[in-house]
Amino acid sequence: MLNEEKYEELHHKAIIWVQQHKTFSDIHDDLIKEGCDELEAAEIVKEVKLIHYAQKRQKGGMIILVGSILLLIGFLLTISNFYANTSFAYVMYGFTTVGLLVIFYGLYEVFG
């Protein structure tokens, strides 16, 4: 059984290891090497997973918002170019393609 100070130290190390792109199974093994028992290591890994996936969802949500704004700007520029009798094909296809790619990347971050 770990005391509160040692638990917080290992929890902080686990967060750093996630930021260094270690796998969760490697983090679990490293926590056991640091002196955790099996249940405490599993609990720390579970908490770190929740934090990691919440950060990825937040990042993905912001990317989706940016993609949506790009689509809206493309729509508004397409409408304005249409009524100004200028070519709107490049604006329409360019902003639509970029906006959709950004949205799909954001969805990858949210679900991946």
Image (cartoon, helix red, strand yellow):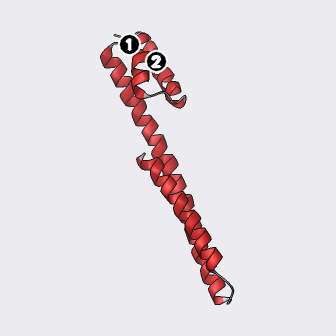
Which of the 4 image quarters holds residue 11?
Answer: top left
- Residue 68 relative to residue 38: left or right: right
Q: Residues within 10 Å of mark 2 (few under 14, many from 20)?
A: many
- Residue located 47% across and 23% down the image: 14
Q: Amino acid at mark 2?
A: Leu
Label 2 – label 1 distance at C-alpha? 9 Å
- Residue for badge 2: 10
Check the picture and name the quadrant holding the C terminus.
top left
Q: Give the structural element (helix, strand or loop) at label 1.
A: loop
Contact, CB < 8 Å: mark 2 with mark 1?
yes
Q: Amino acid at mark 1?
A: Cys
Location of residue 75 in the rendering, given as x and y in whole percent from the top left corner: 57, 76
Which of the 4 image quarters holds residue 7?
Answer: top left
The numbered disc on residue 107 is none
Location of residue 103 in the rendering, given as x and y in whole percent from the top left corner: 51, 59
- Residue located 55% across and 58% down the image: 102
Q: Give the structural element (helix, strand or loop) at label 2.
A: helix
Q: Earlier in the sequence, mark 2 or mark 1?
A: 2
Pick the residue in front: 39 or 107: 107
The numbered disc on residue 36 is 1
- Residue located 53% across and 60% down the image: 101
Q: Is residue 69 visible?
A: no
- Residue located 46% across and 18% down the image: 10
Residue 5, placed above or below residue 95: above
Which of the 4 image quarters holds residue 27?
Answer: top left
Residue 12, placed above or below residue 34: below
Pick the residue in front: 33 or 40: 33
Location of residue 99 in the rendering, given as x and y in whole percent from the top left corner: 56, 64
